[in-house]
Image (tube, rainbow, N blue to C red):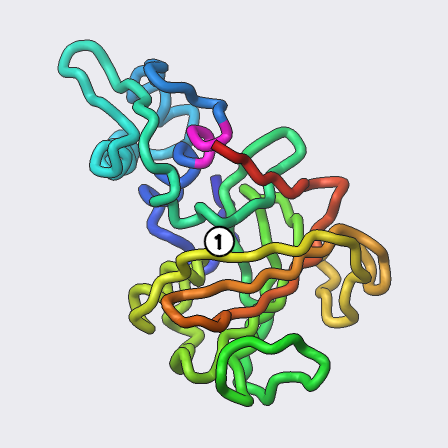
């Protein structure tokens, strides 16, 4: 789980555990009908309290992903894993899985660069630059542009999941996305903590994201370390 360096914008711990299990279900690492270990063993393994684990399991039960049988245990039930906060997050550790989180590097409202593809209706956008982790492993840097008409973004209200922030504070939900995966040069603003130097060629993702509008409301660019993570798209 996260170290003592975790930022104040992190999700509540029980949601982190819930999301970790949801990602394992979506990836097939936890299968339908599988019985989870005893709660005390799970809590010890995850380094959390029994109370926090039970809140996470209750969240999974509410989402139809877990059946809790009195006197028998907790059983995985294949449900709608798209209800995951990170349903559209496609990067995983090479060993599989990993809980996404992020450190905010900068947040500014700026005029959209002329060389950018068209998205949204406003000439301005909110630019968010972040350092991405899976568990405590640094795996990517990303730059997200939210169309200016979508609302104003306050840094102190941001959570690890921008899509959750959009829903809770701006009143819309990202319903679909289009990814273009190629290679690109690590940008010159990448922090020293990132594992690759600026200018290095690595995995590159361009994403267009839509809410209920006809045009994309968000455009993002992600440079990820292919020695630590890979892009995964599962079709079910």
Q: Residue at x 82, y 64 (%)?
A: 198
Q: Is residue 173 above or below residue 49?
A: below
Q: Position of residue 47 (x, y in %)?
A: 41, 32
Q: Is residue 79 magenta?
A: no
- Give the structural element (helix, strand or loop) at label 1: loop
Q: Position of residue 83 (x, y in %)?
A: 34, 45
Residue located beneath label 1 in the image: 6
Q: Residue at x 40, y 71 (%)?
A: 213
Q: Residue at x 60, y 77 (%)?
A: 118
Viewer-nearest residue: 207 or 7: 207
Considering every residue shown, the one lying at the far front of the view is 214
Main SS of the magenta segment?
helix
The part of the image, by quadrant, that contains residue 111 is: bottom right
Magenta residues, start to end: 23-27
Please give left or right for residue 41 compared with residue 193 in the image.
left
Viewer-nearest residue: 205 or 211: 211
Q: Residue at x 30, y 16 (%)?
A: 38
Please give left or right for residue 24 compared with residue 50 in the image.
right
* Residue 155 is at least partly visible in this image: yes
């Amino acid at each position: 789980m996260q170290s003592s360096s975790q930022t104040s914008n992190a999700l509540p711990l029980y949601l982190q555990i819930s999301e970790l299990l949801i990602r394992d279900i979506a990836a097939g690492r936890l299968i339908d009908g599988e019985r989870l270990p005893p709660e005390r063993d799970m809590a010890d393994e995850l380094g959390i309290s029994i109370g926090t684990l039970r809140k996470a399991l209750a969240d999974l039960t509410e989402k139809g992903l877990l059946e809790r049988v009195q006197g028998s245990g907790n059983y995985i039930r294949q449900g709608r894993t798209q209800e995951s906060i990170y349903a559209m997050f496609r990067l995983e550790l090479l060993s599989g899985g990993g809980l996404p989180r992020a450190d905010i590097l900068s947040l500014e409202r700026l005029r959209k660069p002329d060389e950018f593809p068209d998205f949204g209706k406003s000439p301005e956008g909110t630019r968010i630059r972040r350092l991405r982790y899976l568990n405590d492993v640094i795996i990517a840097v990303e730059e997200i542009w939210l169309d200016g008409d979508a609302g104003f973004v306050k840094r102190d209200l941001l959570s690890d999941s921008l899509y959750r922030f959009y829903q809770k504070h701006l009143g819309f939900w990202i319903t679909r996305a289009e990814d273009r995966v190629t290679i690109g040069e690590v940008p010159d603003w990448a922090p020293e903590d990132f594992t690759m130097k600026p200018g290095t060629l690595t995995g590159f993702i361009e994403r267009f994201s839509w809410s209920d509008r006809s045009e994309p409301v968000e455009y993002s660019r992600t440079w990820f370390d292919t020695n630590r993570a890979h892009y995964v798209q599962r079709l079910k």
